[in-house]
Image (cartoon, rainbow, N blue to C red):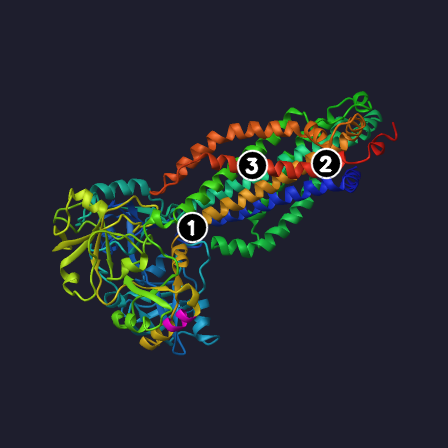
């Protein structure tokens, strides 16, 4: 019997090729999206599970008034000592620091990003599986390498005991390789290609002890089954430390929670978007299948009637149609696996993951459950529908005429319109907001044709500037702490000794405003030939002048870093900090002959010449440092990867929903045209035009579209408003957003339904009526 069910299912697919193809492809799209969501969710929720003591490891988080933020994912180095000393629940604490560095292979400098300075107990708290060698000692100038980095620098040779030349924060050192460990899995926030002995911390880091800076990553090991929430309350009550930061305190965050709750990452939002988007895409595919199959099965009403008349039971009919669904879902699942396999490299690149199709038992179990749920949800309603009819009704010739007025199908197609319109409107809002933030008049600066590089290790930047400007392909050169809209450096060390208000502090060279075309409102900016500007003068923005209550700020005195400075100018409120920050008061000091970023504006018509000349000058200045020039756009996108992923995911799901809706509407129009061939023929004989026939057959779909548009617009308006509140510079929500989205969905409706219905309307009516 089961074999017969399967044979009938394949015969049905063969007999209804186009509807079956639509169903299989639709389910494959939904299932592939759901599989990506399933794999990604499992990957994210198993973060840090590769460490044996993951349930006992916690990261120290700092809370306080940091300007636009009240929380930092790092802390003071001294907390690694003081927390275990004051709280018996904490058995150990270690300090570490992420320090991108330069390593030399055959005297060729290579930039390595994932370098960490850490105390030796760091590798005991976290799980590192050693292939050779052992953990370094804090008393040595040594390091441990990952397997991939060891192969990169030493090939197949044993790296243990070998010397490796490195430049750590401007300090050249020879490091001994103490051990080589297996590469960590991708789902850990620890990106460690090399871990360097803490013995070098005082030499290469600023303030690696005490409570002077919160730049360090501190990890604590707690006793088993410790209640972190209760421990944090105890820390907040009893742990005091010296800090000028208002309301400053520390707390522990379980290491398993850190990835999804990181302050400066959008990981949780990406997980939610992918999970909800995958689920939504699968549900839409299932709704498509239910809608299509409930119509397609009406072509088999006489077959069902004959079976029931010959003694078949309702459960047999139900089993047959559930088998049909299982076969179609299985074919869709196979196609989905192919899509996932081919798409994984692109997905991993976009999401910075290392997902594979090498399933473990947990993932296989989840996939099996996904398959069963899909078969049940897709097949239950159509199967129940066909198994409940009486044989006499099924054998009537008029039964099964489909006019498209099924209430359930109306609800399903209206729901698809709702989702499609909503996502398109949100996509338009996000794109308009992104375009708004690119406008010079909004951000207050221009970064076109701007490139930059790390400003350290080139010696005197004044000399570099003079040599670079000898070539006309470079229009201007400057250097600064960072570029506009890329970083904020908040401090309370200004105005007065007991001040707790935070302000953004910035350091740059005299040509910074000219290079970025930033407007000067009052006074002047720094002058390169006036050395006193560096020691005595500051420039503020309009907001700072307003906050201080200064109508005439020029000549006013302001304390900065325990020294009095004179205000010589006021700049516009350009976007100095990233767009997620509110407008902040800004104090600008003049830089010396070194800074974090060396910045160039180049002639767009001579880009290649500019790159070559800059590279030549920098190579002459320091042949031992790698040259990696980046455009402003590349630099900003690197710092906001997780937020760009969010926009990319939304765009992808919009396309998936549109494709799903397109397939559904095409399938529906196919059935409407096929089931109404005689009606079309009669209408044509009586003089009806193609447009009239199209309107009669599609007006129900038009009505559902109009209802969906009315339902979704206020919902979209609310969500858009909530999204825009995360930006200090916001677009106004205007009517064109809704008009464009409505036109796009209406166009999709006309294209997807028009082809089949108009083709049927243009046929010779004799072909449809010849057998009457």
Label 3 vs label 1, nearer the camera? 3
Q: Nearer the viewer, residue 731 or 453?
A: 731
Q: Are marks 2 and 1 in contact (CB under 8 Å)?
A: no
Which residue is identified by label 2?
Answer: 758
Residue 98 seen anywhere in this rendered image of the structure: yes
Which residue is identified by label 3?
Answer: 743
Counting labels gives 3
**Upstream in sequence: badge 3 or badge 1:** 1
Which residue is identified by label 1?
Answer: 642
Where residue 461 appears, as percent x and y from the top left, is: 27, 69
Q: In this view, does 22 lie to the left or right of 486?
A: right
- Whether 575 is drawn above or below 611: the answer is above
Placement of the N terminus among the 4 image quadrants: top right
Q: How many angstroms separate mark 2 from mark 3 (CA)?
A: 20 Å
Label 2 vs label 1, nearer the camera? 2
Q: Which residues are the magenta region? A: 609-614
Q: Is residue 229 left or right of residue 666?
A: left
Q: Quadrant of residue 402?
A: top right
Q: Which of 562 and 761 is in front in this view?
A: 761
Q: Is residue 8 magenta?
A: no
Q: SS at mark 2?
A: helix
Mark 3, other Cα within 10 Å: few <14 / some 14–19 / many ≥20: few
Where residue 105 appears, as percent x and y from the top left, is: 41, 75
Where residue 422 appears, as percent x and y from the top left, is: 51, 36
């Amino acid at each position: 019997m089961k074999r017969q069910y399967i044979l009938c299912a394949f015969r049905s697919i063969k007999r209804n090729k186009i509807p079956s193809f639509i169903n299989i492809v639709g389910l494959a799209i939904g299932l592939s999206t759901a599989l990506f969501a399933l794999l990604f969710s499992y990957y994210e929720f198993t973060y840090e599970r590769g460490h044996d003591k993951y349930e006992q490891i916690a990261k120290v988080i700092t809370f306080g008034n940091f300007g636009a933020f009240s929380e930092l994912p790092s802390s003071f180095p001294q907390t690694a000592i003081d927390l275990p000393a004051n709280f018996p629940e904490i058995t150990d604490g270690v300090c570490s620091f992420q320090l991108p560095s330069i390593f030399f292979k055959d005297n060729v400098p290579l930039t390595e990003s994932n370098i960490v300075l850490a105390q030796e107990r760091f590798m005991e708290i976290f799980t590192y599986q050693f292939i050779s060698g052992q953990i370094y000692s804090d008393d040595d100038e040594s390091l441990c390498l990952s397997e991939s980095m060891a192969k990169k620098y030493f090939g197949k040779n044993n790296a243990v005991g070998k010397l490796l030349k490195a430049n750590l924060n401007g300090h050249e050192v020879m490091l001994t390789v103490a051990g080589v460990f297996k590469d960590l899995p991708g789902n850990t926030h620890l990106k460690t290609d090399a871990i360097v002995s803490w013995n070098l911390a005082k030499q290469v880091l600023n303030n690696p002890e005490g409570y002077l800076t919160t730049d360090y990553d501190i990890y604590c090991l707690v006793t088993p089954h410790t209640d972190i929430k209760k421990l944090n309350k105890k820390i907040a009550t009893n742990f005091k430390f010296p800090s000028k930061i208002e309301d400053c305190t520390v707390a522990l965050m379980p290491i398993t929670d850190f990835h999804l709750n990181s302050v400066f990452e959008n990981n949780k939002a990406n997980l939610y978007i992918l999970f909800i988007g995958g689920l939504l895409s699968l549900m839409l595919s299932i709704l498509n299948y239910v809608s299509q199959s409930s119509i397609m099965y009406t072509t088999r009403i006489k077959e069902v009637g004959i079976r029931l008349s010959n003694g078949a039971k309702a459960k047999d009919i139900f089993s047959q149609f559930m088998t049909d669904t299982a076969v179609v879902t299985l074919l869709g699942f196979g196609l989905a696996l192919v899509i996932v396999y081919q798409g994984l490299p692109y997905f991993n690149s976009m999401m910075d993951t290392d997902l594979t199709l090498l399933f473990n038992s947990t993932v296989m179990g989840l996939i099996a459950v996904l398959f069963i749920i899909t078969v049940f949800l897709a097949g239950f309603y159509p199967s129940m529908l066909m198994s409940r009819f009486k044989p006499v009704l099924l054998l009537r010739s008029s039964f099964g005429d489909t006019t498209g007025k099924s209430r359930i199908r109306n609800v399903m197609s209206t729901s698809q319109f709702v989702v499609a319109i909503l996502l398109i409107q949100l996509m338009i809002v996000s794109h308009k907001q992104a375009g708004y933030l690119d406008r010079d008049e909004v951000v207050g600066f221009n970064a076109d044709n701007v490139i930059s590089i790390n400003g350290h290790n080139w010696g005197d930047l004044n000399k570099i500037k003079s040599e670079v400007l000898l070539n006309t392909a470079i229009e201007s050169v400057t250097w600064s702490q960072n570029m506009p809209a890329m970083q904020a450096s908040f401090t309370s060390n200004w105005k007065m000794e007991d001040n707790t208000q935070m302000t953004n502090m910035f350091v740059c060279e005299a040509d910074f405003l000219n290079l970025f075309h930033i407007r000067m409102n009052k006074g002047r900016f720094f002058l390169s030939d006036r050395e006193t500007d560096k020691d005595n003068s500051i420039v503020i923005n309009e907001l700072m002048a307003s906050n201080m209550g200064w109508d005439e700020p020029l000549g006013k005195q302001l304390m900065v870093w325990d020294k009095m400075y004179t205000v010589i100018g006021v700049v516009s409120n350009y976007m100095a900090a990233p767009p997620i920050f509110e407008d902040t008061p800004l104090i600008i000091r003049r830089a010396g002959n070194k800074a974090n970023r060396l910045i160039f504006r180049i002639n767009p018509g001579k880009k290649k010449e500019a790159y070559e000349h800059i590279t030549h000058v920098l190579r002459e200045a320091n042949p031992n440092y790698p040259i990696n020039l980046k455009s402003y756009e590349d630099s900003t996108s690197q710092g906001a990867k997780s937020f760009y992923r969010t926009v990319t995911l939304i765009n992808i799901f919009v396309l998936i929903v549109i494709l799903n809706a397109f397939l559904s509407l095409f399938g529906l129009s196919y059935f409407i045209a096929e089931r109404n061939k005689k009606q079309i023929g009669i209408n044509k004989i009586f003089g009806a035009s193609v447009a009239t026939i199209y309107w009669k057959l599609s007006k129900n779909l038009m009505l559902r579209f109009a209802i969906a548009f009315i339902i979704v617009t206020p919902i979209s308006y609310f969500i858009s408003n909530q999204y825009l509140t995360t930006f200090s510079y916001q677009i106004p929500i205007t009517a064109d957003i809704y008009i464009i989205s409505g036109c796009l969905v209406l166009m999709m409706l006309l294209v997807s339904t028009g082809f089949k219905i108009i083709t049927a309307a243009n046929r010779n009516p004799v072909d449809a009526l010849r057998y009457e």
